[in-house]
Every structure is written in structure tokens, then in C-alpha cells.
Image (cartoon, rainbow, N blue to C red):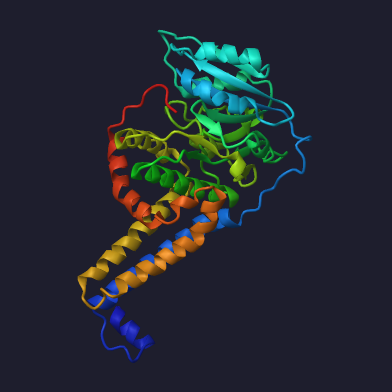
Amino acid sequence: MLRLDKFVYMLFPEFKAFGLPELLTMCACLGFALITINYLYIFLPLSLFKARRLNTTSSLDPVSIIICARNEDENLTEFLPKVLTQEYPEFEVVVVNDCSWDNTEHVIDEFAKIFPNLRKANIKEDAYYKHGKKFAILVGIKAAKYKRLLFTDADCYPASNQWLAEMAAGFSESREIVLGYGAYEKKTGFLNRLIRFDTFAIAVQFLSAAIKGRAYMGVGRNMAYTSDLFFRLKGFSTHYHIQSGDDDLFVNHAATAGNVDVCISTDAITYSNPKKTFKEWRIQKARHLTTAPLYSSSSKAALMFNYFSQYAFYAGLAGLCFSVNTLLLLPIILILKIIVQYALLNKASQRLAERDLLIGAPFYELTMLLIYPIFHITKLFYKPEKWNR
């Protein structure tokens, strides 16, 4: 068998020896190459994307906006008017009051007196049957008058009154799913920036995948699909036993290479209040991670490569510390990586209105790599509730 040092010597006759410094350098360069490929794969499609949109809103079909609410009287009072006042030719808002024991039903009834396009669907508590959010969504879909459905949560609000028009414009005869960006509000503190960066990074990845015809997930805070598609695929039947997944697992099951469009207009972003403590966020992330094992093999492979490339880069970078002859390379490779990251992330952050996250992106990324194992450990002990956003 040909030894590596002899092979290198054949290619480079001037080469004298292949030792630890050379091996560490090769590992670091390989890590840099992998993470650069990953960045190109994730960031470029979204940065270069040109939206396919209709010229006018007059030709757009009517839409049903569906919101599931359980004990959301305060959020509905604050955010529902922003949904009801969208500029669009014809639409309705269906709020599913799912066994609320606060003033949710009263809030819906009062708004219905002002907005004739608001409709209510009630679900009463059943002592013999406990259900999750998927059942509430199914009730909302069956109550909807129109075939085109737009989904958001009761604690979300659209960035503008053009949200519905922008999202609905992604529909066509062949496009049955439209994926949007569900962001979190900007607050003070490091935790807020970390949550927002994680949400932004995940969105860039799944939106880019959809642009390439490989959609694997969406977020229920801002996504749309047709009722025809839902019923044709028998809804959530393949994963109804999983409490989460009404958004990502459905898209993973329903998406094809040609039936998904994405909407990245800043007018079409929805915003939610982020978790205020690390414990709350940790539990939320554990719940989200419970659905990943049910993704398709290709989806899981793409996600694994994303994390592998990042861990491989930092492992290669750390390896440079084991030899005094390679220490100088550490800052050089790190700076090159940051330059590549900024260059590719800049446009994507601009398109999703997250420019303030750009400066700290390398630090946020490294922090997420350190704490993601905590989320996965929490997932092992996570006991899902029957109803979650």
C-alpha cells in the first residue's frame, strides 16, 4: 500500500517530510473546504432567488386564513386586527377556539361584530378524547370556505397589510405550497439574539432547499397550502401520532420538486414573541427536534452535512493548537472563514430583515454548536403536551 508521505513526495519532489504539522494543516483546510461548500449550498440559493409573482392582486383567488387558539385572549386582542385588515380582494379569517377557558371566545365574538370576514370554529372539551393541535387545524380546514389556506399562530402578527397578498401570490396551478419566514421580535439581551439567529439560520436553510426544489419543512407561523393537497394526501395521517409536525412533517411529506414556492418579501414576514428564559427555549427546541427523525432520508442527510461541516471546521481549527508550527494558521483560516461567511450571509440577512445579526454571526454560530447537544439531551426526556405551538 502506498504511504501518504510517499504519495505526497511523488507529487511534490521538494517535499521533505509529512509530520504532525502537515496533517493538522490538511485537516484544518478540509474543514474550511467543507464549511465553505455548506455555506454556498445554504446561502446562495436564497440570496440569488427571484420571486415568481403575479402582476396584480385582482386575479388572486380568495384565501382562508386559519388561526388555532387555546387561551389566547390577550394575543388575539393585540394581533388579530392586523390579520383582519389585510389588503386583499377577498379573504376570511377562521379562528379555531380550541377548548379555551379564558376570554378567547368572547374576543373572537366581539371582533366578529366589526369584521364580517371573521369566522369562529369551536371545539369543546371532551373527557374521553384528548387531542392535539393537528385536530384543531383539521377543524379549521374543514370550516374554511376557500381552497387556498394561509396559516399563522395566535401569538403572531404580520409585518404589514401586504402579508396575505405576498404569500397568496406564490400560489399557481402547479404551486400548492408557499413557505414564508416566521421571525421573532427584536428584544434586548443575548438570548434574544441567539434565538433569532437560530431561527434565521434554520429559515435560510429550509427556504434555500425549497428554492432548489428540495423543500423539507416549513413553520406554522407563516405557511400556506391548498385544501385539495391536504385532503389528497390524507392530511396528517402519516404522523398524527406525533404531537408536533403539523408544519414541518406535513411539508416533508407533501412537497415535490415543483409544487412549492417561497415568499421572502419583508412585507410578508410574521413576528412572534420569543421565549424569555433559556429553560423555556430549551423545552421548545426539544419539542421541535422530536420531528426530525421522521424526515425523509435526503432531508436528514442535508441537515447532517450542515452540522458535520461546522463541527469539522472547528475541530480542524482546534487541531492547529497541537503544534507550534501551525498556530499561526489558526487566525488566518478563521479570518478567511468569517470573510466567506459574511460575504454569503450578507444578502440573505438583508432579504429576511435580519441585518443586525450579521456582525455577531460567527459567535452565534459557535454558541449554537456548543448548546445544541443540550437540546438533544433534553429531547430524550421531553414529555409532549397535547397542544403546542
Instruction: Tell me where residue 171 sits by quadrant.
Output: top right
Where residue 186 appears, as percent x and y from the top left, is 45, 41
**Residue 142 image position (x, y, % from top left):** 61, 19
The correct choice, above or below, for 72 with respect to 277 in the image is above
Give the quadrant of residue 108: top right
In-front residue for pair 97/387: 97
Is 118 situated above or below 39? above
Instruction: Choose between 118 and 255: the one closer to the eye.
Output: 118
Is residue 30 at least partly visible in the picture?
A: no
Q: Residue furthest top?
A: 127
Q: Residue at x 52, y 24 (%)?
A: 78
- The location of residue 328, given as percent across then percent down, is 28, 75
Q: Is residue 85 visible?
A: yes
The residue furthest front is: 188
Instruction: Indicate the quadrant containing the N terminus: top left, top right, bottom left or bottom right.
Output: bottom left
Viewport quadrant of the C terminus: top left
Which residue: 61% across, 36% down? 160
Residue 72 coordinates in the image, percent (x, y): 47, 20
Q: Residue at x 51, y 41 (%)?
A: 217
View extreme (bottom): residue: 14
3 or 287: nearer the viewer: 287
Tag count: 0
Q: Is residue 84 above or below residue 351?
A: above
In this rendering, position of residue 187 left or right of residue 91:
left
Q: Is residue 61 left or right of residue 236?
A: right
